[in-house]
Amino acid sequence: MTQMDSVFKSDVCNNNTSSRAFHAYCIGTQKSGTHSIAGLFQPRYHSAHEPEHYPLIELLLANQPVNQINEQLTKRDQDLSLELESSNILSFFIESLVSEFTEAKFILTIRDCYSWLDSCLNHQLNAQRTEEMAFWWRYRDFCFRQEAFQHAAQEKTLAEHNLYTLDGYLSYWQSINQKILATIPPERLLIVRTVEIEASIDKIAQFLPIPVETLNPSRSHLYKAQKKFNLLWQIDRDFLEQKVEFYCRPFMAQYFPEVQQMNDVLGGDAKEMKK
């Protein structure tokens, strides 16, 4: 996706940060709905999903000093002049965004760890390991800590499909959500559950604040998986639930108290998921 593909210019806004109707970021894990949030604001507002992602990932992987990161993020913001930028990559820069853009507000999209993990696996299995996609796989190696964990026997299907470990996936889910919630002041943060994005349009409009009729609910379900592979059902269930308890249970209890186990959101049989 090019920058021109992902940026939609507003009919009420030009490329000048002083003329923005509002300034907001949508952050969260991969596959949590950041694409759909960007869609809500199109075409009325200057909104983008993961614009200039290559230099942003390069900045992340370069591990530069904080002052240099802040300078580059500030220049990037001035160049893009977005009202809403939605990007899971920006979650790694949350401290800088909060400190450098003191008037900005933040929308966190949060998804239960089971359906999130299922979506991640499906997305990565649908993604080809081509030379063109190599940069994204470098980013995934960073997110899911490829060098830090080894596959256990109970999750051998993940190794067989050249995917990451449960430790890698679930520690990422936990750390991103924890970091965002610990960093952003409550008055600047709106938490939206992925399954409730469309139902949260009024709340989003009030939070920014903008007229609710300027949002576009028809674009609230973007970027669904091309094909489902049902790999979660091939992982030892007790092993999976133990990993969820270790990494995810505190946040699950707070934001998804109705979800006690995988069956509560995905069902107990992979056959039920095939459509």
Image (cartoon, rainbow, N blue to C red):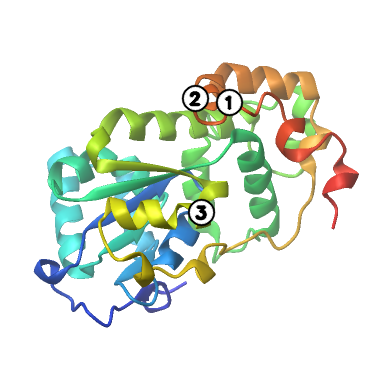
Describe the element under mark 3 as helix, strand or loop: helix
- Residue 133 found in image quarter: bottom right
- Residue closer to the observer: 62 or 194: 194
- Residue 269 found in image quarter: top right
Count neighbours of disc 1 (C-alpha within 10 A) and say few if under 14, some if 14 to 19, many if 20 or more.
few
Q: Which residue is mark 1?
A: 257
Q: Which residue is mark 3?
A: 199
Q: Which residue is mark 2?
A: 254
Amino acid type assigned to the residue bearing label 3 in the image = Ala
Amino acid type assigned to the residue bearing label 1 in the image = Pro
- Residue closer to the observer: 67 or 16: 16
Count neighbours of disc 3 (C-alpha within 10 A) and say few if under 14, some if 14 to 19, many if 20 or more.
some
Sequence-wise first label, 2 or 3 = 3
The residue at the far left in this view is 18
In the rendered structure, the answer to whether residue 216 lies left or right of residue 228 reads left
At 44% from the left and 70% from the top, the residue drawn is 216
In the rendered structure, the answer to whether residue 234 lies left or right of residue 248 reads right
Q: Are marks 1 and 2 in contact (CB under 8 Å)?
A: yes
Sequence-wise first label, 3 or 1 = 3
The residue at the far right in this view is 271
- Residue closer to the observer: 101 or 79: 101
At 43% from the left and 29% from the top, the residue drawn is 175
Amino acid type assigned to the residue bearing label 2 in the image = Gln
Describe the element under mark 2 as helix, strand or loop: helix
What x and y, as percent, mark residue 272? 87, 46
